[in-house]
Image (cartoon, coloured by chain):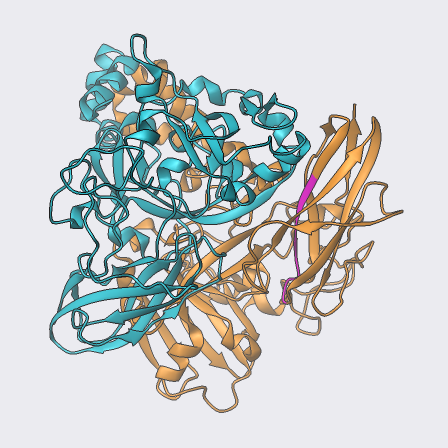
Chain colours: A cyan, B orange
Amino acid sequence: MTETINLQRRLVLAGGAGGAALLASGVGLRAQEASALPDYVSFKNPDAMIVHSNNTLETERSAFGASSLTSEERLYIRNNVSPPDESVLDDRDAWEVSFEGVAEPRAITVGELKTMGVETVAMVLQCSGNGRAYFEHQPSGTSWQVGAAGCVMWTGVPLRAVVDALGGVAEGAQFVTGTGGEPIPDGIEPRDVIVERSVPLDALDTILLAWDINGEPISLAHGGPLRMVVPGYTGVNNVKYVNRVALTETETDALIQSERYRIHPVGTDGSPDYPSVWQMSVKSWITGPLESAVAGTNQIIGVAFGGINAVESVEVSVDGGETWEAAEFIGPDLGRHAWRPFVLARELEAGNYTIVSRATDSEGNQQPEEMEPNDPGYNHNGWRAPGVELTVG
Amino acid sequence: MTETINLQRRLVLAGGAGGAALLASGVGLRAQEASALPDYVSFKNPDAMIVHSNNTLETERSAFGASSLTSEERLYIRNNVSPPDESVLDDRDAWEVSFEGVAEPRAITVGELKTMGVETVAMVLQCSGNGRAYFEHQPSGTSWQVGAAGCVMWTGVPLRAVVDALGGVAEGAQFVTGTGGEPIPDGIEPRDVIVERSVPLDALDTILLAWDINGEPISLAHGGPLRMVVPGYTGVNNVKYVNRVALTETETDALIQSERYRIHPVGTDGSPDYPSVWQMSVKSWITGPLESAVAGTNQIIGVAFGGINAVESVEVSVDGGETWEAAEFIGPDLGRHAWRPFVLARELEAGNYTIVSRATDSEGNQQPEEMEPNDPGYNHNGWRAPGVELTVG
């Protein structure tokens, strides 16, 4: 729904003369301001979001600050297809998931899942295309900079607990395949649009079927009533509105798995011959100061994460990578898959600076200076391109 | 501002005819529903809050669930006096704090404080009177049950860093005294109403002067633009709108320190002869299931914290304290002053149960069965009274 349609809808709701009065009133002004956000994500903080399109909203870099977690009000949006009707949230516990590829397959409601186990994981949720704007070949798709990512806490039942309760993994299974419950429009081949993703069976021990985000029920926009979250894997693998979880011998043949979200050379088409976009790599970026600062001591802050691994350390350079200084982590460690805010307290004289950060994970992997290009512009983690040009005066 | 005044104000803003149209429209209905919350906390989630009065709102017990953190939308409200005008948030960095009792006293803006250091602490914020409803002598004041508490993350500058930058602690200082910037109404003796609290100098190394809560700027209702947070100390010690921080030889003589917030015997008056309400003790409560449940395996959840110490363990009893079983913590450990959600997976046959929880801190302190009464009803941490009567069918 566009801004205009959203505002028109409000006017219809308000009635003719009332609508006109609304426009001339303070209430009308507030509605108008809020409508820069698409209607279904009107709960977002408009100051914190860059609206690329109805289905793609990025968090403002400055909005991350030194935050350990990202609220739903500030979290990016990337929807491949339209969500189910919001009425599915009327009775969240009634949402049903069919489990297959286990010894005793059956359907289980969210209400029953809640009796089977409870765990919480803090993790980076990051769009596969985050940082696409930094590829020189200008891939098609949304030009995300750093803001198609956030760190959130999910609460749900460990998939392992459900699988164990269903008699364990069926023989031969090699993947966990989750299916999204978005309605498939009439006349469209389901395989072409269905959000169905397979990840390696290794992920079984960390996957949650989550009903809460940051301690509250997940909004429709972010996948409520139930989302399959796969810590350390890019956003697309975290299937919203999950209504089927299957332990499968092969990957799904849905286009979103077989052709899309593949790392293939520039100018080629995606296919199962190329690696799927799964695990995330070590990454970091500066969140402040971003444009200008006052001479003297500055607190240079940012966020860093290891992706599938824990982040071990992060360095900051104020001279575009010529020299590096160790930054310190801020706040509690939320676990292997979360990000950690960091800070470097640094004297800065008047002048121009190129500020960059470079993180290293627990396995010794360090962000590269430049990212090897791939056609769709996935998984960018080079440290040079997201650098900040800072004027200190 | 009451619910009625709030709605009237909206109507005035909307203008005469427009206002009438509003009332008849969907927009009007939304405004009406939201106005169950006082205007200044209209951002709260109405489903999660119990409104005791304009200045006292409690979080619904069920709203805690297994949450590691509490959002501002669900966090309790307890204001002793009216906050400053919301215009103080127009330029948060301009807010000024005078520092005294240091070698080089001076005033510092929030903007400058942000250059002096950044740290984040997760901590339980709990009203001194939380649990007052469970005292049998029915103390005066708000009858809080468990919900005048939450676990939040604050980001700000360590007070120690500021004090060091100002040349260190002045000789003889024994307390950190913070003063709230609430306006004092004309004709009232400041000492009678000023929110000025002194805590022991020991707290200097953990106090933050915080500008962010849960990664976002602190709302006016919760003390923005700047709050002095004292991890492990009850809510009143966490001074909102702090505009003066003094390292003092004696405690402030403000009534809120000298007579109020003292632990004194039932039937007596408060005075400096009695202990101040400072450090919090070990505590826990069940958050679900709360009234009824289905026979079979249930996940009994709750939250537990150690107060000034870390929480070490928590046990759950389904028979009112006859027998106890060890619960497991859920999710990441956010540090010594945070709470930890816990769970006990338990088979429950049809019948009636009294579910209670009992936490132990890192020093071996355990919640008592009953809390020794004190006149104002502070610091309740008995395990029996907050028990849950559960019907399983």
Viewer-proximal residue, A308 or A85? A308
| In the image: residue A164, left or right of residue A214 | right
**Residue furthest right in the image:** B322
Viewer-proximal residue, A242 or A302? A242
Res B17 seen here: no
- Find residue A20 and report its horizontal and vertical position in percent: 19, 17
Viewer-proximal residue, A99 or B13? A99
On whether residue B305 falls in the magenta region, the answer is yes
Quarter of the image with the C terminus of chain A is bottom left
Q: Residue at x 50, y 56 (%)?
A: A335
Location of residue A73 by image quarter? top left
The image shows residue A287, relative to residue A393, as above or below, that is: above
The image shows residue A375, relative to residue B175, as above or below, that is: above
Quarter of the image with the N terminus of chain A is top left
Res A51 seen here: yes
- Find residue A195 and report its horizontal and vertical position in percent: 37, 26
| In the image: residue A230, left or right of residue B354 | left
Location of residue A93 by image quarter? top right
The image shows residue A212, relative to residue A93, as above or below, that is: below
What type of secondary structure mainly makes up the magenta span?
Answer: strand
Q: Residue at x 34, y 71 (%)?
A: A327
Q: Residue at x 16, y 73 (%)?
A: A319
Q: Residue at x 40, y 18 (%)?
A: A85
On whether residue A4 falls in the magenta region, the answer is no
- Find residue A3 and report its horizontal and vertical position in percent: 20, 26
How many dots with numbers? 0
Segment colored magenta: B300-308
Viewer-proximal residue, B81 or A285? A285
- Find residue B284 and report its horizontal and vertical position in percent: 69, 52
**Residue furthest top in the image:** A187
